[in-house]
Image: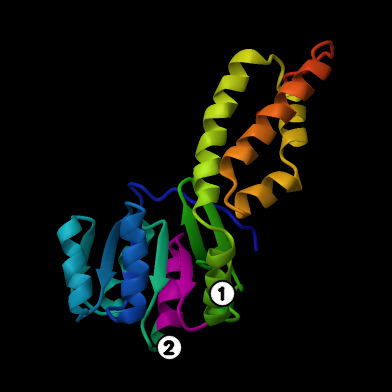
């Protein structure tokens, strides 16, 4: 599998099914600002409540009645509890050019949705390629304990520091070298211990020292930092 992060704002996705599995899919799609069409004769009250967001449209029909429309969607989730129905949805949607995810058959999936830990702009994901979503949730819970919200806060600070470095240090290769030297294990250890200011001081010191050391070098300008 090739892991990617996909921007879904303004994109259309279809979720076939109206139960608890479908609800979890829809909830996350709405959070990413996708437009979601729900295909099901009946849906949970929780799904109906999501329609207030303006991003969820309920198509009250079976998958057989809806299948010819799958070409309008970037992603299609087959989220019923019927293996045969999900297989048919995947076949029809894939033939129409959509990427598909089956709730009942991992081998019929073009993509999997990992368990996600979000801390500000930092995202960490756990995926089992459909083998055991429950185990992915277990690993996620462990990661949430280990990697606290301070990582997201530190990343936000690094973003500001990076902008300042772009102004003061010329040459992409030189800036890359500075960051490689600054991002060492000791920094992570300090963050995990909650010693945020000390971690920032260490980064400042590394960048300042390495910057002085490399001031006479010729930095190329290939790629982006």
| Relative horizontal placement of residue 75, taking residue 122 as reference (left or right) | left
Q: Quadrant of residue 61?
A: bottom left
Q: Vertical placement of 79 versus 170: above or below?
A: below
Residue 164 within the magenta-colored segment of the rendering: no
67 and 211: which is toward the camera: 211
Task: Measuring from the top left, give residue 170's x and y in whole percent.
Answer: 69, 14
Instruction: Residue 126: tell me if it is visible.
Output: no
User: Which is in the foreground here, disc 1 or disc 2?
Assistant: 1
The kind of secondary structure element at disc 2 is: helix
Per the rendering, the mark at residue 48 is none
Identified at 17% across, 68% down, the residue is 49
Task: Measuring from the top left, give residue 169's x and y in whole percent.
Answer: 68, 16
Identified at 34% across, 75% down, the residue is 22
The kind of secondary structure element at disc 1 is: helix
103 and 173: which is toward the camera: 173
Instruction: Residue 48: tell me if it is visible.
Output: yes
Q: Which residues are magenta?
A: 86-105
Task: Measuring from the top left, give residue 125's x and y in whole percent.
Answer: 56, 61
Q: Vertical placement of 216 versus 151: above or below?
A: above
Q: Vertical placement of 133 versus 185: above or below?
A: below
Q: Residues within 10 Å of mark 2 (few under 14, many from 20)?
A: few
Task: Measuring from the top left, give residue 39's x and y in whole percent.
Answer: 27, 72
Q: Residues within 10 Å of mark 1 (few under 14, many from 20)?
A: many
Per the rendering, the mark at residue 84 is 2
Identified at 73% across, 35% down, the residue is 182
Of label 1 and label 2, which has the lower sequence position?
2
Query: What residue sits right under mark 1 in the picture?
Result: 136
| Relative horizontal placement of residue 38, taking residue 48 as reference (left or right) | right
């Amino acid at each position: 599998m090739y892991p990617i992060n996909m921007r879904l704002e303004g994109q259309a996705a279809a979720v076939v099914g109206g139960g608890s599995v479908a609800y979890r899919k829809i909830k996350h799609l709405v959070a990413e600002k996708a437009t979601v069409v729900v295909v099901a004769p009946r849906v949970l009250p929780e799904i109906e409540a999501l329609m207030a967001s303006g991003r969820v449209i309920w198509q009250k029909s079976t998958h057989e009645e809806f299948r010819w429309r799958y070409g309008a969607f970037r992603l299609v989730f087959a989220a019923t509890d019927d293996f045969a129905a999900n297989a048919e949805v995947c076949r029809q949607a894939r033939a129409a050019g959509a990427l598909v995810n089956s709730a009942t058959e991992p081998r019929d999936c073009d993509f999997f949705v990992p368990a996600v830990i979000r801390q500000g702009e930092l995202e960490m994901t756990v995926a089992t390629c459909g083998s055991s979503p429950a185990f992915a949730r277990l690993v996620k819970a462990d990661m949430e304990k280990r990697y606290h919200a301070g990582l997201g806060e530190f990343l936000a600070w690094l973003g500001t520091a990076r902008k300042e470095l772009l102004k003061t240090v010329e040459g992409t290769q030189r800036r890359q070298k500075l960051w490689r030297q600054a991002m060492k294990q000791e920094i992570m250890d300090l963050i995990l211990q909650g010693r945020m200011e000390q971690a920032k001081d260490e980064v400042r010191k590394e960048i300042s020292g390495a910057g002085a050391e490399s001031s006479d070098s010729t930095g190329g300008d290939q790629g982006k930092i």
